[in-house]
Amino acid sequence: MSGVAILGAGAFGTALACAMSDRVVTLWARDREQAADIQARRENTRRLPGVHLRDTVMVTSELGDAMADTILLALPMQKLAGFVADHAAMLRGRRLVACCKGVDLQRGIGPAQVIEQALPGAVTAILTGPSFAADIGRGLPTALTLACADDAAGAELQEQLSAPALRLYRTTDVTGAELGGALKNVIAIAAGIVMGAGMGDSARAALMTRGFAEMVRLAESAGAQAETLSGLSGFGDLVLTCCSDKSRNYRYGFALGAGTEFDTTTTVEGAATAHAVARLAREKGIDMPLTTMIAAVIDGKVTVDQARDALLSRPLKEE
């Protein structure tokens, strides 16, 4: 089968199907009842209510019916490795675009690298950047980064996946795009904590700035280009997720800061990423105090007040 298929009928996968519905696109849902319901209602009432799916979007729970030349993997980061390994034979020979953000907790690598480990030699890319599923699904203007190490393949994917309201910018710096999308989620949790605890907008601005410095520091140590982190997949995504309660990571952090309950069924990629990155920072000897402290707060090893006091009492330094 030619064309485009999206594996994963969560909010983001459904939104991408809506954005690309100017052509025939297949959306795969793991749950058979969910797939049948979306196909019949033309709406994902569970994950993206209120957004209509055009008839050009074909919904299925049969993975074999969702195989295409180009496959977008809109799966949770911590589920990606297992899925690709389990279905390697079906995925081999296709262009695979990861549409999740984070660092694999067991392997300490990003989504494109996860795919490449399971399928050596595959054409892989990552689609990332500042975006909320509801905005994309409703056709609001959105710009994302498409990162592919193979520049020619990246150009073809850019042309194929761009849509009327979805503008894609291309880069070959896959590592930078992966880390930008992953690390900003950790800082978004921190921003939520700051606002939930009533520390104010000035504190949030300071945290975002110092958090961005940590993002660049780790990315450069991994061979990424600082310029990539200054683009959509880094700085752009950081601003969005740190300043809007549409962000799951921000809302999770806000609940931590305010001491309120949070829906445990909601996927918060930044929580697992904080632990993976804190471990990487220790192993590499990279100074990442914010990330390390967020991981400790999530684990309940320190309180929000203790984290604040520890960060404010660090030795003074040049910027």
Image (tube, rainbow, N blue to C red):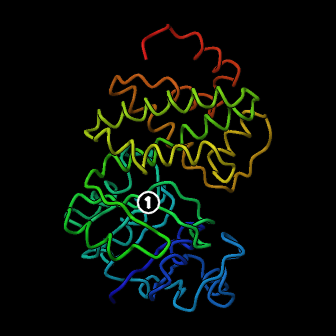
**Seen in the image, is 282 located left or right of residue 240?**
left
Q: Position of residue 28 (x, y in %)?
A: 51, 79
Q: Which residue corresponds to the image point at 51% horizontal and 63% vertical from the top-left?
A: 142
Mark 1 residue element = strand
Q: Position of residue 154 (x, y in %)?
A: 26, 66
Q: Which residue corresponds to the image point at 68% horizontal and 34% vertical from the top-left?
A: 193
**Vertically, is 301 above or below 157?**
above
**Seen in the image, is 88 located left or right of residue 122?**
right
- Quarter of the image for residue 218 reads top left
Along the line of sight, the residue nearer the viewer: 184 or 19:
19
Identified by mark 1, the residue type is Leu
Q: Position of residue 30 (x, y in %)?
A: 55, 75
Q: Farthest residue toward the right? A: 260
**Seen in the image, is 236 located left or right of residue 226?**
right
| Quarter that holds the N terminus | bottom left
Count the marks: how many? 1
**Seen in the image, is 172 located left or right of residue 138?**
left
Q: Position of residue 256 (x, y in %)?
A: 71, 36
Q: Which residue corresponds to the image point at 45% horizontal and 89% vertical from the top-left?
A: 24
**Vertically, is 257 above or below 10?**
above
**Vertically, is 181 above or below 124?**
above
**Vertically, is 47 above or below 207?**
below
| Quarter that holds the C terminus | top left
> Residue tagged by mark 1?
144
